[in-house]
Amino acid sequence: MSVISTETCAPLAVLGHDVQVPLVSGEKVTYAALDYAASSPALQRVWDDVAAYAPYYGSVHRGAGYLSQLSTDLFEQSRRTVEEFLGLREDDQVVFTRATTDSLNLLAGALPAGTRVFVFETEHHASLLPWRREGVSVSYLRAPRSHADAVAALDEALAGAGDGPKLFCVTGASNVTGELWPVAELAATAHRHGARIVLDAAQLAPHHRVSVRDLDVDWVAFSGHKLYAPFGAGVLAGRSDWLDAAEPYLAGGGATRTVAREVDGSVAVEWNSGPARHEAGSPNVIGAYAIASACRALSEAGFDALEAREQQLIARLKAGLAEIPEVKVLSLFGDDSARVGVLSFVVQGWNSSHFSAALSAEYGIGVRDGLFCAHPLVRTLLGGEDTEPSECGAPEPSLPGERSLNAIRVSFGAGTPDEHLERFLAAVRELVADGAAWTYRSEGGRCVADGRRQ
Ligand SMILES: Cc1ncc(COP(=O)(O)O)c(C=O)c1O
């Protein structure tokens, strides 16, 4: 029997915790970073590890010198650390990529011809879109309103899918609502129908232990910059067979075993198998090392304790927002569904861009507004059928009082002090009660304070 600890831990030390930012009033306050779901701050530990290694930096898999050897060892050790962190199976492999988007595009390029892909329309665009390519058919499943609905919808779709390779892609935790998806049940369902499953753990891995073995998923993808390691690397980990049979993701040095001139003047290439096949070019050793450092730091802090603390913060946030009738929290699976520290909401009478701009300009609080690169999901949650395109990351035209077409997202994690959430709740209460103290205008698609008091 596993016993879940309820013992919490202190926030982990992160860079930028004491950064002062200017308010529209001219005063300065400590920045409250509440946009971890976009990019989390670097763990101090990650930064220190990278700084300690930096003087020894050298080329990886090329170079006979001492620092090249050391850097190559460090890169490969980082791979081992990620293998352990993810609880991989014996024959699985870890490919270092640029981030989750890159990882899922890599896998999409490795699908056997004729693969049928199944994906819920509620996914982040990084898991929704990479599969649209020649030789692959994609089925978009309608937004489920419960875990049971999701499992039943997948079961039904796969039952009618016939033979041939099949892949189901799902996110572990929504980047919009923070809600957890029933990954293990979905994996069991997929496997029962002979389909494989890839887990988009971009939002899950920073908050929860992710074990490929325990969840029984075939692949997992995540990003270093959301896991407190913002040095340009990400991970695709899992089964080797499809990856080894596929064309290399990038053609170039490192991916090849031999390259030879043929008698007819052409060039014959034998590609590597294993991670090297998809890691052409000079590897990002600092990025990989930073991810390994974050994996070690999170494991040592202990996910039980990190989660226990995060759940306390979520409970406090939900209770605080529930006291403000004008605030509506968005949810796919119901208000009581389990979630990580990510929560989106709208405020009655407010344009979300205006509200977020006021949180920044008047309170020094950084949240995000928009459709969060999950347009179909946010539109489902907002109940709107608007179909006009919107730039990823760019809010809808946003003048105070306009109807909201987008939402506000607050997200946090292992480095967030309680005080940041208290400041956020106090600011939301004050803005709702009194309105913004300054005036705002639209500039370059964003809502900005224009320096005049109301
Ligand atoms: C659930 C989810 N998947 C994938 C991505 C894409 O991650 P990246 O931008 O690091 O490639 C994100 C980014 O926000 C995300 O939240």
Image (cartoon, grey):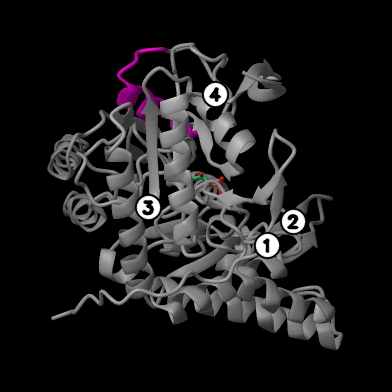
User: What is the secondary structure assignment of the residue under circle 4?
Assistant: helix
Q: Name the residue at the right extreme.
A: 65
> Which residue does the image show at 53% across and 37% down from the upper left?
368
Whether tag 2 and tag 1 are in contact, CB under 8 A, the answer is yes
User: What is the secondary structure assignment of the residue under circle 3?
Assistant: strand
Q: What amino acid is at disc 4?
A: His
Q: Residues within 10 Å of mark 3 (few under 14, many from 20)?
A: many
Quadrant where the C terminus sits is: top right
Image coordinates of residue 118 in percent, x first then y, are 31, 38
Image coordinates of residue 14 in percent, x first then y, are 60, 66
- Mark 3 CB within 8 Å of ligand 1: no
Mark closer to the chain start, 1 or 4 = 1
Q: Residue at label 3?
A: 198
Residue stretch rendered in magenta on the structure: 372-386
Q: Residue at label 1?
A: 255
Nearer to us of marks 2 and 4 is 4
Q: Residue at label 4?
A: 354
Quadrant where the N terminus sits is: bottom left
Q: Residue at label 2?
A: 252
Estimate the spatial distance between the alpha carbons at disc 2 and disc 1, rounded to whole Å: 6 Å
> Which residue does the image show at 49% across and 33% down from the upper left?
373
Mark closer to the chain start, 1 or 3 = 3
Image coordinates of residue 231 in percent, x first then y, are 68, 61
Q: Name the residue at the bottom extreme.
A: 66
Mark closer to the chain start, 2 or 4 = 2
Nearer to us of marks 3 and 4 is 4
Nearer to us of marks 2 and 3 is 3
Whether tag 2 and tag 4 are in contact, CB under 8 A, the answer is no
Tell whether position 385 is magenta.
yes
Q: What amino acid is at disc 2?
A: Gly
